Image (cartoon, rainbow, N blue to C red):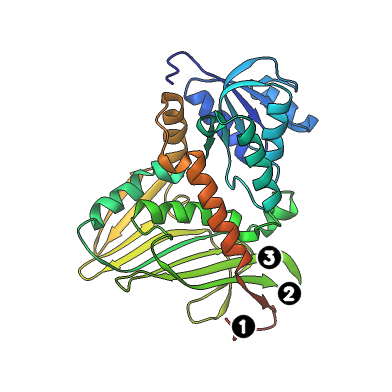
Amino acid sequence: MHHQLAPNVLIIGYGKIGKIKAQIWRQCGANVSISDITKKQIESAHMEGFGIDHPPFHTTYNFVDICTPSGTHIDVLWHLILMGSKFERVVIEKPLISNIQEKNKLYQLLDNDDSLYEKIIVNEQYYKSKMIKLLREKIKNDSIISLEITMSKNRTVDNKHGRFFDHDIGSYGIEVPHMLAILEILDQSINDIKLMKNVLYVDSNNKSNQGVHIEYVSDSGATVSINSFLGDFKISSSNKILHNLTIDRHVFIKGNNFEYRVTLDPHPSQKRLVTELNFGTESILIHDDMLKEHISDIIKGNIAEGCKLKYAIKQSQQIMSLFNNAKIVTITKEDNHVYNS
């Protein structure tokens, strides 16, 4: 499905991600309308020059992009279909589903209309990352000894200001989907490696102050670890409790004859969207606007396999399973060490 003419796009939910995506759809040539339940967001969208639409939507949209808080995605989709909205494709932010009720609701929709398998696209921009593709190219003939991905940011202030926190899957719903996508691109899909450690660290005084550390080992003995600390603490590899002060998004890969260190956006010392690949004394900077790349490809009908519904369902199930089987370790701020993880 190619949209050479400007596609009509409806964005539902004009919060942080909705605002970012509205601008990108517009940059990609789309006519963008916004729907939101709060008057303040509607006024803000109007000031930015976007069209405003209210349910029931009578316009036929080429794309509806659901940018509401996770935990509401399936409900929004349900209402969209219930009121007979006309759309060719619907784009949904991750996580697609966070619990069994949402999963059942989604399957009910699919049972009623299996054309939704084609129509639903689940957003994952890392499949379009130039940097991760370059990394894949660099390591393709070598065997890996260790691979570590970290995506950490203290979001406690964001959460206080109303940024969404998913209580169904906690910290597993935010950065873990991106990290699993990166593993897949680097041919280390978690389907093919063995889970060794899966710890959810939770602050004893604040349930949404938490972080995740997961370790796998591959058949060849390579270790794969992912970290995502989204509160005001992080746990070092020697189990020390440290302050989580900086945004840290990186991929480190070691092999017998190489070591690559990738710093993802936001880079601490570069402007936005610039990523860096470091090997030994050399480094390469790449402008990596993957969300724009992703949206522009969606308009062209060039959709990454991992964004198709059946893959997204599988990944949501992996994440729910990780969350449900996590070892929960409670952190007490007075301690400076974790003894039982």
Crowd rating for badge 1 (residues with CA inside 10 Å; few <14, some 14–19, many 20+): few
- Image position of 119 (left or right of 218): right
Secondary-structure class at tag 2: loop
Q: Which residue is mark 3?
A: 209
Amino acid bearing label 2: Ser
Q: Which mark is residue 336?
A: 1
Residue at 56 percent across and 51 percent down: it is: 316
Say which mark, if any, is on residue 204.
Answer: 2
Of residues 68 and 244, the one drawn nearer to the viewer in this rendering: 68
Q: Choose between 275 and 292: the one closer to the eye.
A: 292
Identify the element where label 3 is drawn.
strand
Please report the residue visible at 30 percent of the width from the left and 53 percent of the height from the top.
135
Q: Nearer the viewer, residue 218 or 130?
A: 218
Residue at left offset 53%, top offset 24%: 26
Marks 1 and 3 close (CB-CB < 8 Å):
no
Marks 1 and 3, how far apart in space?
16 Å
Screen quadrant of the C terminus: bottom right
Q: Is residue 113 above or below residue 208?
A: above
- Residue type at the position of mark 3: Asn
